[in-house]
Image: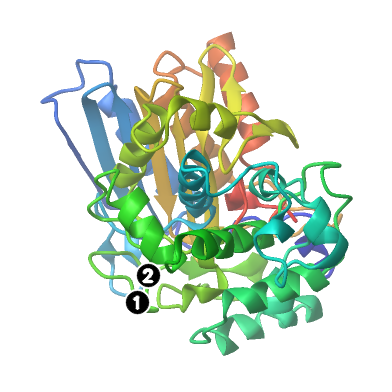
Amino acid sequence: MRITRLIGTVLGTTLLLTTALPAASADTGTAPSAAGPLDRTTLRTTLDAVHEAGMYGAYSSVREGTDRWTGAAGLADVDTGRPVTPGMRHRVGSISKTFTAVAVLQQVERGKVRLDAPIGDYLPDLVPGERGRDVTVRMLLNHTSGIGDYIRGAFPSLDQNSTASLDEERFRSIAPGELVRLGLAAPATGRPGERWSYSNTNYVIAGLLLQKVTGQDAGTYITRNVIDRAGLRHTTYPRTPYIKGPHSKMYESFYGLIDPPRDYSVYDMSWASTAGAIVSTTDDLNRFYRTLLGGGLIGRAALAEMQTTVPANGVDYGLGILSFDVPGCGRFWGHDGAVFGAGTIALSSPDGKRQVAVGWNLMKYQRVGADGKLEPSPIDDALNAHIVRALCPAAVSEAEPESRTAVAETRRLLPEGLPGVDLAPGTWVARR
């Protein structure tokens, strides 16, 4: 089967080249032992298991109230053997969408934007004609606009079963308006408001809306009014292809088309724009969602709008934030995302007290079977197990029925993922 057919169905992960690599692990925390609400032994064991299953390297931060644990397992550089360490900076992909949505909702609170106003009222030249009249700001933020994704247009070799354009465009600077043009030229995914269909184009338009109503570059506004306001010290909206500060290499396999996997940690992220360019750490992501859910970035009414959801392939999607329920553990809010070589997820309980954020540095490691489907990967199971144990401390034993249900339900979300390409929710195995 041609890999490009998967671009229309699933983008995932799996390449078990690390089984012979030496494992490295580290953890830190505020409490001196595992006695407290966080089971540090289990968290470390399950994170180590992600590396042992074939992931090059992973880092994780877990919180329960004021108690926290952060750890790392595996390699940041497979050539030198440099280990990953807690707190490494990381491209977080579509988690950027929550930041962008918060920024737009701040403008809603100030009366400069109306969620149910047509986008053409603000950007008539960018989204002209019928679409400009029918697509609302809300539809952009909850992915019901029907506007297609720009990814294939931005990386055309993917339609020829080739990843050549990933390398050819590594240092390309592409303007947000050009990304929107590519997205508007792509086939529509439905009529405005008809159904949920993930598209990165929506959030590039949202960024241009932000620029129009604030008079500032969107990245500058998000930095000053979201990142800085939340007190995030290691989160940036990048201006260069380089990540400042300690970080891992970021390896892309693209289902074996890139063999061995190639490092894409140095990359011009203008192609991701306000849909997915942010760099952060797992600790910062937990702080961000905790601040957001606690009312520190937008008020109660705006947060209620943000948490008004539509059905989205097995989860619920709001305005730049998703939610899903883990049996026996309750509802969690957050987002996830991926860029070339890096995957991330951050989830929080509604009160922000229980949180997990995980990042990893090998993407689309899965293989395609003879039936044209992605083959199961032990990496997916290991990631899911770590996340479930972080969110649900009682679900420690697979022998417990409730624990088995929780793992199965999370597996349904995480390996299956949601539509999108490389910047989608559920994106360590994301679909378009």
Give the mark count: 2
For this view, does 146 lie left or right of residue 375? right
User: Looking at the figure, which quarter contains the C terminus?
Assistant: bottom right
- Quick one: SS at disc 1? loop
Q: Nearer the viewer, mark 1 or mark 2?
A: 2
Could one spot residue 422 in this view of the protein?
no
* Distance (Cα) linking label 1 and label 2: 8 Å
Q: Quadrant of the N terminus?
A: bottom right
Circle on res. 242: 1
Depth order, front residue of 27/349: 349
Between residue 266 and residue 24, name the one nearer to us. 266
Residue 71 locus on image (x, y percent): 27, 42
Q: Is residue 309 above or below residue 23?
A: above
User: Is the residue under label 2 in contact with that under label 1 (CB below 8 Å)?
Assistant: yes
User: At which x and y percent is residue 124?
Assistant: 72, 67
**Residue farthest to the left?**
32
Most extreme residue toward the bottom is: 168
| Residue bearing the label numbered 2 | 238
